[in-house]
DNA sequence: CAGGATCCAAAACGATACTG
DNA sequence: CAGTATCGTTTTGGATCCTG
């Protein structure tokens, strides 16, 4: 299902591989998953719990990442089954970027919260 | 490093400020807008054309960014009206991060494209 | 030109139920 | 445990019309 659902205007770099890669990183779950996998292989339900996301969505996100060669899926045929996800070498290149994003987020979170309050206070109906 | 079941850091739970900031940066338009504004103030329709997005969506994205104190809106009461958007000082802190993201995207785009083709070929229904 | 208002289509999400 | 299938809901984006 996650084939090529993209079809937008052809501007700037839209449609180019670089923009697609950018949009992948900017995807809603990519950064969170990458951050979670940074510490090593992680099981499906662990991931699910950490991100607070439904199995449905997580499965699809992981499949998309696997498709892009950023994440590897490893099946251990035990009983019960164990499946671990880990960053590929390519996926590992996201780590520094993700770390930057996270650092930025922590740094500006308070300021953003303040700005938002101010905005809401002034822009009330 | 491997085999160490450290669960030291629980990922940011949904609702925390840091995660919210992270999700804002990971938002679909934030990075693209930040990148466009990096070169200086830009007009609404310029932005619109560069991103290839509808006025509606752009307006909403810009308003959200303005609310978070990342972007400033400047109105020039000329005829016709001119409105320019620019990064605030807070918003400017996104630039290094965005640059990193973009650099990463360009670097891995070919590999991702290849991985995707391979995946699709092997996983063809 | 810059956007709000409205309506509509498509995508994303979540909950539940079910399978290997 | 690790998913898939189905369904209903929510979110998101686009198109069109309209205003200052």
Image (spheres, coloured by chain):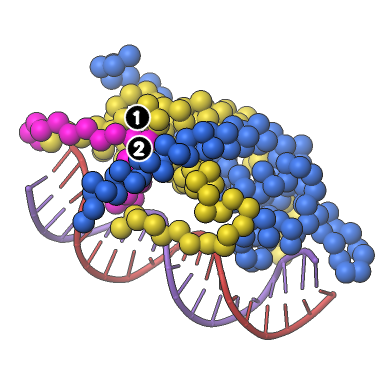
Chain colours: A yellow, B blue, C purple, D red
**Which quadrant holds the N terminus of chain A?**
bottom left
Q: Position of residue B105 (x, y in %)?
A: 52, 38
Horizontal relation, residue A57 to residue A117: left or right? left
Question: Is A68 within the magenta?
Answer: yes
Horizontal relation, residue B73 to residue A71: left or right? right
Q: Residues within 10 Å of mark 2 (few under 14, many from 20)?
A: many
Horizontal relation, residue A27 to residue D4: left or right? right
Given contact means CB atoms under 8 Å apart, are the residues at marks 1 and 2 in contact? yes
Along the line of sight, the residue nearer the viewer: B120 or C7 = B120
Identify which residue is drawn at 38% across, 41% down: B114
Identify which residue is drawn at 29% across, 16% down: B2
Along the line of sight, the residue nearer the viewer: B30 or B17 = B30
The residue range painted magenta reads A52-80
The residue that disc 1 covers is A88
**Which quadrant holds the C terminus of chain A?**
bottom right
Question: Is B27 within the magenta?
Answer: no
The residue that disc 2 covers is A69
Q: Position of residue B65 (x, y in %)?
A: 67, 49
Identify which residue is drawn at 14% across, 31% down: A76
Q: Is residue B20 visible?
A: no
Q: Is residue B80 above or below residue B25?
A: below
Identify which residue is drawn at 29% across, 49% down: B120
Q: Secondary structure at mark 2?
A: loop
Along the line of sight, the residue nearer the viewer: A89 or A31 = A89
Which numbered dot is residue B68? none
């Amino acid at each position: 299902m996650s084939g090529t659902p993209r079809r937008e205007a052809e501007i700037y770099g839209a449609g180019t591989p670089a923009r697609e890669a950018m949009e992948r990183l900017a995807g809603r779950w990519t950064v969170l998953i990458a951050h979670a996998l940074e510490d090593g292989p992680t099981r499906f339900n662990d991931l699910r719990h950490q991100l607070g996301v439904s199995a449905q969505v997580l499965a699809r996100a992981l499949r998309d990442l696997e498709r892009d060669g950023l994440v590897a899926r490893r099946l251990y045929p035990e009983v019960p089954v164990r499946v671990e996800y880990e960053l590929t070498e390519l996926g590992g290149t996201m780590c520094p970027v993700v770390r930057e994003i996270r650092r930025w987020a922590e740094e500006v979170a308070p300021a953003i919260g303040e700005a938002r309050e101010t905005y809401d206070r002034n822009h009330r109906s």
